[in-house]
């Protein structure tokens, strides 16, 4: 079974993150058993595009003989309480429940689906849509080695993936890489505004900020130097970058301190969402 999903993959919630992953999965061809979307309104964009994708508004509309290999739970954490119980009929050793919901613990799913359910808690990010995501997942005790390998194959088909045994780490992962793209987009926005304030046109500032962030990310990925060294390579002694970094790295209110505070706040919120 490892390598492709040969029975149906059910995607519960085809919003921003579920849709991003589905985009990547369809491009990768890993969902050989077809995809069934359950979403009251979302998911229509994936129909009629030459893939084996069907869509139902509610769980009650699903065919009785559906035998999913993987059920991806991709509704908002606040929607999970009202959603999960109606999937209990699929719980058993041969169906993997793979949740991507922030905060929702393996214990939460076992409480609702029964202790025998095969559950994986995962935290992806939206660059999955272009196969540049990164996901960390944690299996429960019912997940077999083959099932974990299948989940990793599924997650690796949209980027990098790794598994951990310590579920407690997932809250920090959520804060760092789950939400991370938002921090980078904010950086692009902030650089753009600063460029405009310094006299550049809107279009030019936006392009310079975007390509600089994308290029720096690619360079950091490709280089043997670590990011600190790459930063030093840009910073000529007594030059212009040094002046900017003196502001950005200010003790107390600089970017490094703010980032620690931001990640801690997001980690705490992930724990709160456990419900
Ligand atoms: N966005 C991101 O970058 C990331 C999100 N996540 C996690 O992914 C999950 C989804 O987030 P996101 O995609 O942003 O949220 P969205 O609101 O964009 O997507 C959720 C989708 O689920 C639908 N939905 C609600 N209830 C049900 C139901 N009972 N059955 C089927 N579908 C339902 C929603 O419909 P409607 O809008 O009509 O309610 C919506 O289309 C969250 O748990 C989040 O923590 C994880 C990593 C990153
Ligand atoms: O903001 C959130 O709660 C979700 C989880 C990580 C990214 N988006």
Image (cartoon, rainbow, N blue to C red):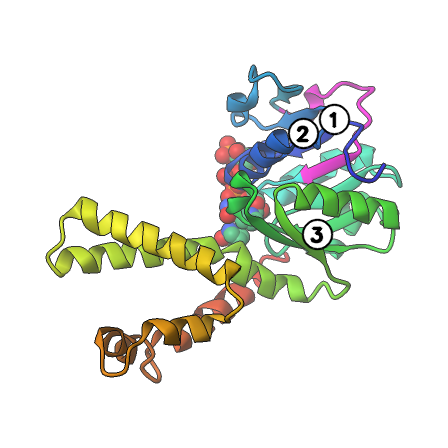
Neighbourhood count class around disc 2 (C-alpha, 10 Å): few under 14, some 14–19, many 20 upward: few
Question: Which one is in front, 78 or 222?
Answer: 222
Is 29 located above or below residue 189 in the figure? above
Q: Are marks 2 and 1 in contact (CB under 8 Å)?
A: yes
The answer to whether the residue bearing label 2 lies less than 8 angstroms from the nearest atom of ligand 1 is no
Q: From the viewer's perspective, is 78 left or right of 60?
A: left
Residue 236: x %, y % from top left: 28, 77
On the question of residue 261 being in view, the answer is no
Secondary element at tag 1: loop
The residue indicated by pointer 3 is 121
Q: Which residue is mark 1?
A: 32
Q: Is residue 203 visible?
A: yes
Label 3 to label 1, Cα distance in Å? Answer: 23 Å
In front of the other: 208 or 261: 208
- Tell me if residue 61 is in the magenta stretch: yes
Which residue is labeled 2 in the image? 29
Which residue is at a point 33% across and 50% down the rendered structure image? 211
Q: Residue at x 82, y 26 (%)?
A: 67
């Amino acid at each position: 079974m490892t390598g492709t999903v040969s029975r149906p993959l059910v995607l519960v919630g085809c919003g921003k993150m579920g849709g991003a992953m589905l985009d990547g999965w369809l491009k990768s061809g890993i969902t050989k058993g077809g995809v069934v979307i359950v979403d009251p309104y979302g998911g229509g964009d994936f129909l009629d595009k030459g893939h084996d994708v069907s869509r139902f508004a509610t769980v009650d509309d699903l065919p009785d003989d559906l035998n999913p290999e993987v059920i991806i739970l991709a509704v908002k954490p606040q929607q999970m309480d009202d959603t999960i119980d109606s999937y209990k009929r699929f719980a058993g050793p041969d169906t993997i429940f793979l949740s991507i919901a922030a905060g929702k613990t393996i214990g939460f799913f076992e409480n609702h689906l029964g202790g025998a359910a095969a559950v994986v808690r995962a935290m992806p990010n939206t660059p999955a849509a272009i196969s540049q995501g990164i996901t960390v997942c944690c299996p429960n005790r019912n997940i077999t080695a083959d099932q974990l390998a299948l989940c990793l194959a599924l997650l690796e088909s949209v980027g990098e993936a790794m598994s951990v045994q310590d579920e407690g780490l997932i809250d920090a992962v959520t804060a760092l890489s789950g939400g991370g793209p938002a921090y980078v987009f904010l950086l692009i926005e902030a650089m753009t505004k600063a460029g405009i304030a310094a006299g550049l046109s809107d279009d030019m500032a936006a392009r310079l900020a975007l390509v600089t962030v994308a290029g720096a990310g690619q360079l950091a990925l490709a280089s043997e130097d670590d990011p600190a060294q790459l930063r030093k390579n840009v910073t000529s002694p007594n030059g212009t970058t040094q002046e900017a970094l003196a502001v950005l790295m200010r003790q107390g209110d600089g970017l490094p301190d703010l980032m620690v505070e931001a990640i801690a706040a997001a980690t705490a919120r992930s724990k709160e969402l456990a419900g």
